[in-house]
Amino acid sequence: MHALSTLTSLGVTLLAVIGAASAAPTPASSSTCTIAKASDVSGCLSSTNIVIQGPFTVPAETKLDLSGLKSGTTVTVKGTITWAKSTTLTKKDFLFTLGGSKITFDGTGATFHGNGQLYWDTQGANGGVNKPKFFKVLTTGGSTIKGITIKNSPIHIFSIGGSDTTLDGITVDNSDGDKLSGTKTIGHNTDAFDVSATGITIQNSNVKNQDDCLAVNQGSNIRFLSNTCSGGHGISIGSVDSDKTVDGVTVQGCTVSNSDNGVRIKTVYKATGGYVKNVSYKDITLSGIKKYGIVIEQDYENGSPTGTPTGGIPITALTLNNVHGTMASGSKYSTYILCASGACSGFSFSNINITPKNPSCTGVSTSLAGCS
């Protein structure tokens, strides 16, 4: 009888323990974790459903690092997230980093504000006050980044690494940087999409900035589709430096307005060991282009082309089809090509109609459409 009583007592106790354990809250990766201030980030990295809930301000000298997300995580941004001005963060730093496989980042209706107007001094990343870059992309595996508005980035906006990622419906608004100090815009080096990656699609996006709308520095299988670019330096391949390769870029259905250049390929002067090939621009509309409608140059140095092309980074299999539009008053050339001897080949240009027509082509056949 005593033994039975003891067993019964133990059974009740065991059931009570099990019940208590099952009732205790257990963190689950699928539950929603909310980031309402910068210090909340570390506690949310184990969740696969994260909400960045604005409005809030990220303190000075602080970066939001979401590079270690679990596979399949969804990040939703609501409201406006503003970064206070920093003094110690440099061009090697990023205000926001996103990384992981199969990530969905949805910023529809939300804004990341970088307070670039507090940094801009016409010098960009080349000098002046320290300036951080904004959004580092390290996602892979079929990830998507969509809908976010980026306002007033100090310098470069999206720096894209990783692979197999689509950026869709992005707004980049650095138009406040168009203000002049003397003859220079105060915003400088505000590249919208710098790409060094494989399998990247950027589409349905709107950019207002003071530098390249797209700059593919290296990588393959890159698509830039149905985007609008205003105020900057055009849709660019490069600058491509030594030992860097670009293979397979499609630019289609895009508009470039009030910019220095329209379509642009630039390789670095005296660079060697790399190449640019299999690049296509199709159905590109230009308006108000201030310097060059089409520019392909193998003499590039940071802001100061040498005028002497070098062939260490050959450009081959380039297709331009239906590139059309207008140059601004006082522009330089509708088409400007400066290639080293034998370093540009396999060019196919058709339906090139940029007015007023004023070409200058060196190192390619002068019968090429747009050159004659």
Image: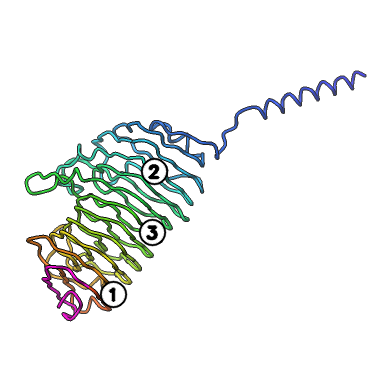
Please tell me which residue lies in front, 359 or 140: 359
**For this view, does 135 lie left or right of residue 10?**
left
Q: What kind of residue is marked 3?
A: Ile
Is 5 or 233 nearer to us in this picture?
233
Q: Quadrant of the C terminus?
A: bottom left
Q: Main secondary structure of the magenta part?
A: loop
> Circle 3 — which element?
strand
Residue furthest right as drawn: 1
Query: Element type at marker 2?
Result: loop
Spatial distance from mark 1 to mark 3, Cα to Cα?
21 Å
| Amino acid identity at mark 1 | Thr
At 20% from the left and 77% from the top, the residue drawn is: 369
Q: Earlier in the sequence, mark 2 or mark 1?
A: 2
Q: Residue at x 39, y 37 (%)?
A: 78
Residue 313 position in % (x across, y down): 25, 70
Lateral position of residue 367 relative to residue 101, left or right? left
Q: Which mark is residue 171?
A: none
Q: Position of residue 125 (x, y in %)?
A: 21, 48
Residue that label 1 marks: 316
- Residue at the spot of label 3: 200
Tag shown at residue 107: 2
> Residue 250: x percent and y percent?
33, 66
Residue drawn 32% across the image and 51% down it: 159
* Magenta span of residues: 352-372
| Residue nearest the observer in this picture, 203 or 177 | 203
- Badge 2: how crowded within 10 Å, few (<14), some, or many (20+)? many
Q: CA distance from mark 2 to mark 1?
A: 38 Å
Residue 366 drawn in magenta: yes
Residue 181 picture location, percent across and down? 9, 44
